[in-house]
Amino acid sequence: MKKRLLAGILTGLLILNLSGCGWVADLLHLDQLMPTTTEPTTEATTAAPTTLPQVTEPPATLDPNEPRIVGVSSKGYQIVEDHGLTYVNGVLIVNKKYSVPEDYGPGDLTPECSAAFNELVQAAAADGIEIFMISGFRSYELQTSLYNRYVARDGQAAADTYSARPGHSEHQTGLALDVNSLSYSFADTPEGQWLASNAHRFGFIIRYSKDKQAITGYAYEPWHIRYLGNGMASAVYESGLCLEEYFGIISAYS
């Protein structure tokens, strides 16, 4: 009986001992299988900067039919280009710097210019003065022919003082005309004196004033009048300035 009891105790201790060894082994294996709790290195956690592609808006397409500001005059007036024409303060400018396209032209005096000139003629007649047109609208082709003839006769330097190069003539706009006589003596006639004193009342100015050749680029032409409209013509006349001075623009071939 004692022997059996002793054998049973020994067997139990053996089983317990073997189980303990397995439990310890399991703990060792469990430690190896647990995820690490150490902090990752900086290299592993620092993400490379992401470079995003630059998105740019496509440039707006300029509409050639839309007026655009191309500059500002020395007097602060915006210089606007519209369909190849140049305007300053709403006034179409044609001189040695600013031209008109070859195919531009109303074919005659504009209706406004023609009506204003008729009023001027009637008012002059009421004062006993006869004013009549001798040259109105000129096409690009006609101006080319005239200019080339003057260059052949007098040379370009001289021709440039009294004749506009093609595309640079106010006559092509239908807003300018020559009256009575292409002679400098016209300024001293009753007709020339009346015109100089009254043209602005009907919307015209003597375009190429006396002693302004260095500014306008042309010699004095007492017979050449340009239609601006009553208000503008009166403002320019009363200022005593030529059109280039009034707006602060230049007249010189580039």
Image: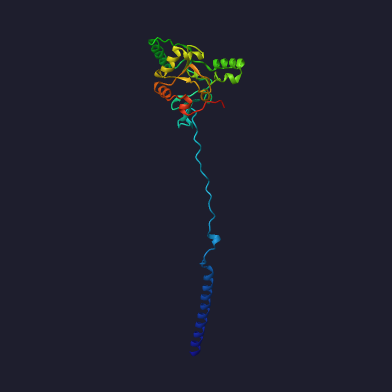
Colour setup of the view: rainbow
Give the number of marks.
0
Q: Which quadrant would the C terminus be assigned to in this image?
A: top right
- Image quadrant assignment for residue 145: top right
Instruction: Please report the residue visible at 50 percent of the width from the left and 87 percent of the height from the top.
Output: 6
Q: Position of residue 246 (x, y in %)?
A: 45, 27
Query: Is residue 10 placed above or below 227 in the rendered structure?
Result: below
71, 76: nearer the viewer: 76
Q: Position of residue 141 (x, y in %)?
A: 55, 16
Query: Is residue 198 placed above or below 252 in the rendered structure?
Result: above
**Res 83 visible:** no
198, 3: nearer the viewer: 198
169, 35: nearer the viewer: 169
- Image quadrant assignment for residue 150: top right
Instruction: Please report the residue visible at 50 percent of the width from the left and 80 percent of the height from the top.
Output: 16
89, 45: nearer the viewer: 89
Query: Is residue 17 placed above or below 209 in the rendered structure?
Result: below
Q: Position of residue 178 (x, y in %)?
A: 48, 14
**Res 230 visible:** yes
Q: Residue furthest front?
A: 188
Q: Position of residue 90 (x, y in %)?
A: 43, 26
